[in-house]
Structure formats: C-alpha cells, structure tokens
C-alpha cells in the first residue's frame, strides 16, 4: 500500500473514532431510560410495552434501547429486535460461555444492578464488552445496556 493511501486510511479511522464515541449512550442515560420505562409502566400497565417495542422508537436512543423480561424469563418488550419477543433469556450465553441471560434475571434488584457480558455491537459489528442496568419492578426486569470501550 502506498504511504499516502496508508496515511489517509489511518486518518479516516482516527476521525471516525470520535463520531463513534458520540453515538454511544452513557451509563447515566441507560439508567434514566430504565427509570422512564418503569414510570410509563406504572402509569399504563402492560400496555406500555407496546411503546417500548419496535416499530416504536420512544425507548431507543443511538445504541441504547429498553428491554423488559416478564414471567417465565421471557422478553415482553424490546426496543431493538422484534425477534426477541417471547425469547427465554436464560438461553443467552456470550462468546466466553457466560450465561448472561440468567444473570440479567437473577442479579436484577429493586435498586438496580449492572450485569456484564459480551454482545455484538451494532455500530462496529464486533463482539464487544457490554453492561446492562437491570431493575426488578412489579414482577418484571427492566433493562438497558451500554457498550464499553
């Protein structure tokens, strides 16, 4: 590769990195999204799950989206994937063998907890470290995850 092409490729990669970081949600934003989802559920009951699921985007912001786990550990709302509705989360295992779906259910508390795992990042297409803020509320687990650099 010619030096000028190599330099241009490196420069473009470096310029894209800040844009990628700007497209990331923060831990505080994930926690706020969960709190907002719980407030909507408290107001509207299970009907709120429609607002939290595609094609609705009220609970989607950049790489942040809400998910809700209900009875029998099944997804009842998901802001990024209709295919996840009805999924038994206890079947979810990351590329390191971590059964993170079980952790999402078991580690959720009324005060909230972070659960760490690895998942494909839709921005990079790579499997990346991720943490989800999960809160147990009224028999459901409300969650929102962030990708960590």
Image (cartoon, rainbow, N blue to C red):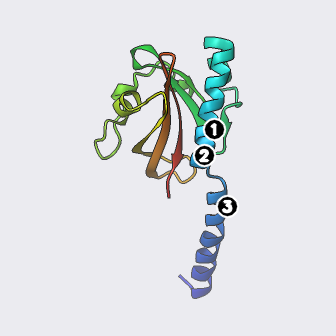
The residue at the point 60 percent across, 12 percent down is 46
Q: Nearer the viewer, mark 3 or mark 2?
A: 2
> Which type of secondary structure does the marked residue at label 2 adopt?
helix
Q: Which residue is mark 3?
A: 19
Of 33 and 129, nearer the camera is 33
In the image, farthest residue toward the bottom: 3
Which residue lies most toward the front here?
111
- Of 119 and 135, nearer the camera is 135
Gap between marks 1 and 2, in whole Å? Answer: 6 Å
* Residue 12: quadrant of the picture: bottom right
> In the rendering, at what x and y percent does residue 36 appear?
66, 30
Residues 17 and 105: in front is 105
Give me the residue at 65% from left, 65% from top: 18
The answer to the question of whether label 1 and label 3 lie on touching residues, with beta carbons closer than 8 A, is no
Which structural element holds mark 3? helix
Q: Earlier in the sequence, mark 1 or mark 3?
A: 3
Q: Which residue is mark 2?
A: 28
71 in relation to 90, above or below: above
Instruction: Decide: is 62 above or below 99.
Output: below
Label 1: element kind:
helix
Q: Name the disc covering residue 8, or none.
A: none
Crowd rating for badge 2 (residues with CA inside 10 Å; few <14, some 14–19, many 20+): few
Q: Position of residue 125 (x, y in %)?
A: 51, 51
Name the residue tied to disc 1: 32
Residue 15 at what x, y percent from top left? 66, 70
| Residue 11 higher or lower than 126, as above or below | below
């Amino acid at each position: 590769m010619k030096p000028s092409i190599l330099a241009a490729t490196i420069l473009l990669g470096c310029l894209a990195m800040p844009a990628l970081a700007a497209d990331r949600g923060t831990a505080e934003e994930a926690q706020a999204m969960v709190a907002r989802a719980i407030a909507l559920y408290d107001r509207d009951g299970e009907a709120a799950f429609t607002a939290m699921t595609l094609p609705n985007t009220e609970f989607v912001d950049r790489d942040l989206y809400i998910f809700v786990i209900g009875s029998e550990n099944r997804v009842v709302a998901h802001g990024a994937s209709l295919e996840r509705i009805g999924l038994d989360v206890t079947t979810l295992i990351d590329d390191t063998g971590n059964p993170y779906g079980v952790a999402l259910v078991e580690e959720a508390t009324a005060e909230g907890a972070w659960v760490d795992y690895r998942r494909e990042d839709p921005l990079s297409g790579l499997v990346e470290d991720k943490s989800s803020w999960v809160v147990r509320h009224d028999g459901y687990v409300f969650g929102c995850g962030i990708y960590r650099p």
